Amino acid sequence: MNTLARRFRALPIRARLSMLVAAAVAFAVAAVSVTCWFIVQGKLYEQLDQDLQRGMKGPQQFNIASFALSNCSTTPQGNAVFRNNYSQVVTDAGKICVTDDSSGTVKVTQDDKNVIKSGNTEKLYYRDGTDSDGNAVRVMIHPLGSTRNQATGELGPRVGFMVAVPLKSTQNTLNDLALLLLLVSGVGVIGAGAAGLAVARAGLRPVDELTEAVEHVARTEDLSIRIPVEEAADDEVARLSRSFNSMTTSLASSRELQQQLIADAGHELRTPLTSLRTNIELLTRSEETGRPIPPADRKALLASVKAQMTELASLIGDLQELSRSEGQRGERVQVVALQDTVEAALNRARLRGPELKITADVQPWFVRAEPSALERAIVNILDNAVKFSPEGGTIDVALARGVLTVRDHGPGIPEDELPHVFDRFWRSPSARALPGSGLGLSIVARTVQQAGGEVTLARAEGGGTVATVRLPGALTAPPETM
């Protein structure tokens, strides 16, 4: 059985659909055919039973039975060539006495004797039997009770009147009907199989197109291919085709973003690497030629090398952050006390801008996020504020009911540059001389969106920039985290 199931599953979908349709139709046709055959058989037998009732001779049965017993003969006197009627009287001992119009005798069974012995004259009994020559007949028995000897007045044996008709014509009709139903069923099953194959081909045509499209993508890596889908179609195949088109569109967009990220990363890496190479070559040439670099210049070169190494490390860290998958982030999501994260980021910002005045009003708020990513995002916002604040300037930080605002008093961002501040590797022309990779705000936007919040940058009244981060959460931590 398991082998057959495995072989069936190994067949193409078209063949399986055709076989399933043919099997379903065969079952339905078989059920209808069998039901029809039994209904016709019942009707024919009902007609035979009605014919037998009409041949019972009515009230004369008892007189006929008495005459037959008194002149008992076991050999029919009628024309035996035309066997169309059987009429005989049977005693409870099984003795047979045929009537004058009988064309044969019917074999008596023990059940017939028991029926006659019962003496139930109100009921007729029907059965299938055979005559003395072995031909099939339909038999009806009517118990008549006990006979009485007219001469002596003594009660005789119990008798029954038995009539029968041949079943040959009825059986021939049923056999012809069975053959006809078998032929019709066979034609129906074959037609159903052919129709199922045609329907399967028509229904699976979009699947063939989808398969060809997938094979084309696997062979050529061409993600521009699309499967045509009717707008009104809403079946499973149409939804599958739309899903495939959405998938290829997303993959194409992802590839484009990946290529753009690689190109931008290469461009950003080229500048510090070129500067590093130049500085290191100057130091190496100084050592090789024996011409020492003045101490001040040497110190400046080493400081530049250190700054460029720091910038490269920061850029690589930002790229690693952007390359992490959503699944990796989801595994580390937990309830975070946002006020503690803001305080930790403020401590780092004060170390980076000791000459600045940083004010903070932080109230409790708990969110679901990745702790390290959320802290990095807030640090990036504060770093931007420190970077663009004038010496001795002020940075105002506030956290209330999930809304974090960071306002600096620097030059601010021009209106035409605000739409681009969260793009990867985008840097304002006025900030390109400052250290940074252009990925900080992009990481901020991605982290905040993954936490279910939003972040905006806008020009502040009186000058400077205000960054606003809104994160969903609660004033108290859930019980399971306490």
Image (spheres, rainbow, N blue to C red):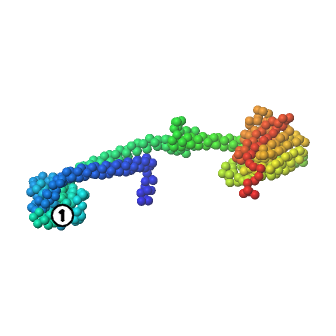
Residue at 16% x, 56% y: name it.
61
Residue nearest the viewer, comparing 437 with 251: 251
Residue at 86% x, 39% y: name it.
409
- Name above or below for residue 396 compared with residue 107: above
Q: Tell me if 85 is positioned left or right of 369 in this view.
A: left
Looking at the rendered structure, the secondary structure element under dot 1 is strand
Residue nearest the viewer, comparing 272 with 85: 85
Q: Quadrant of the C terminus?
A: bottom right
The image quadrant that residue 394 belongs to is: top right
Q: Tell me if 421 is positioned left or right of 22 in this view.
A: right
Residue nearest the viewer, comparing 34 with 160: 160
Residue 440 visible, this orientation: no
Residue at 18% x, 53% y: name it.
58
Image coordinates for residue 127, horizontal then vertical, percent: 24, 58
Image coordinates for residue 122, horizontal then vertical, percent: 24, 58
Image coordinates for residue 248, horizontal then vertical, percent: 58, 42
What residue sits right under mark 1 in the picture? 146
The image quadrant that residue 72 belongs to is: bottom left
- Name above or below for residue 417 compared with residue 43: above
